[in-house]
Image (cartoon, rainbow, N blue to C red):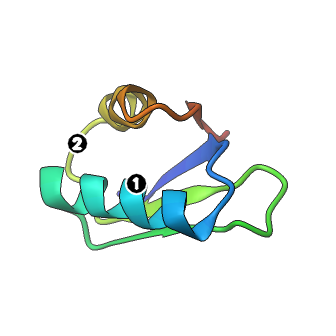
Amino acid sequence: MIGIFKTNIDSQEKRRYVIQAISSSFSVGSCHVDLDDCDKVLRIADLQVEEDIIVEFVQKQGYECAILE
């Protein structure tokens, strides 16, 4: 499954932090945050957990996160 989320991650430093946190906590294929997109889209490939778990995890890291429909 591919997870697509709207975030407020707005710098390379924050992007690295969140991607490392996700990658070390969950089994995922790849993670990317598009800093140029207005929604700062977080895409996670090969997501093995429910999207709500990722939303809650990213929020606990101190960032806004919502499933992008």
Taking the spot 84% from the left edge, 54% from the top edge, the residue there is 38
Tag of residue 49:
2
- What crowding class fits label 1: few (fewer than 14 Cα within 10 Å), some (14-19), or many (20 or more)? many
**Residue 63 visible:** yes
- Measured from the top left, where is residue 11 in percent x and y? 64, 62
Q: Name the residue rendered at 15%, 59% in the picture.
A: 24
Q: For the N terminus, give its image quadrant.
A: bottom left
Left or right: 50, with 3 as reference point? left
Q: Residue at x 15, y 50 (%)?
A: 25
Residue under label 1: 18
Q: Nearer the viewer, residue 61 or 38?
A: 61
CB atoms of marks 1 and 2 within 8 Å: no
Which residue reaches farthest bottom? 30
The percent coordinates of residue 27 (x first, y second) are 15, 59
Q: Is residue 26 visible?
A: no
- Assign the C terminus to one quadrant of the image: top right
Q: Is residue 58 left or right of residue 14?
A: left
**Which residue is found at the position 55% from the left and 56% from the top?**
42
- Above or below, 55 relative to 30: above
Q: Which quadrant holds residue 44? A: bottom left
Mark 1 or 2, nearer chain start: 1
Amino acid type, mark 2: Val
Determine whether, in the image, residue 25 is placed left or right of residue 6.
left
